[in-house]
Image (spheres, grey):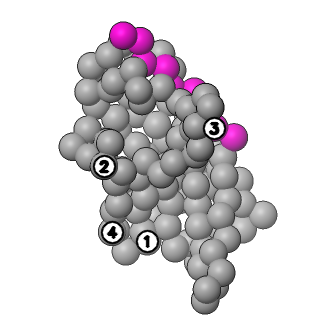
Amino acid sequence: QVQLVESGGGLVPAGGSLRLSCAASGNIFSIDGMGWYRQAPGKQRELVASITSAGSTNYADSVKGRVTISRDNAKNTVSLQMNSLKPEDTAVYYCNLFRKFGAITDNFWGQGVQVTVSS
């Protein structure tokens, strides 16, 4: 199977920065992309940013201009640099890895890291 281990969460004041990292291991052949999702209390999990193996990126409108996703294909790691953090960015952030087999997408998830932005 696939194991995803996140690091870098914590408590930061509004306007601060934080960098999340995720390392993938295990059965990680044919990765199509990796990304980050977040889930705030009482809300659904939502995409923050993703990056394909070819380097194409996708960002949620709420984080555009403040967040940068990057990936090291050789090391199977993905990072999320978050700047100008806002209290509404507070959530549990989950690393995601996905593989596509035709119309089917396999998703794998990390255990999540807490990001808390104080006002």
Q: Which residue is mark 4?
A: 56
The span from disc 1 to disc 3 (Cα, nearest Å) is 22 Å
Labelled pair 2, 1 in contact (Cβ < 8 Å): no
Q: Residues within 10 Å of mark 2 (few under 14, many from 20)?
A: few
Q: Secondary structure at mark 1?
A: loop
The image position of residue 117, as x and y in percent, is: 42, 18
Task: Mark 1 vs mark 3: give the one in front.
Answer: 3
In the image, which residues are magenta? 111-119
How many numbered callouts? Answer: 4
Q: Main secondary structure of the magenta part?
A: strand
Instruction: Identify the disc placed on residue 53.
Output: 1
Q: Which residue is mark 3?
A: 112
The span from disc 3 to disc 4 (Cα, nearest Å) is 24 Å
Q: Secondary structure at mark 3?
A: loop
Task: Mark 2 vs mark 4: give the one in front.
Answer: 2
Q: Which residue is mark 2?
A: 61
Residue 112 falls within the magenta-colored stretch: yes
Q: Amino acid at mark 2?
A: Asp
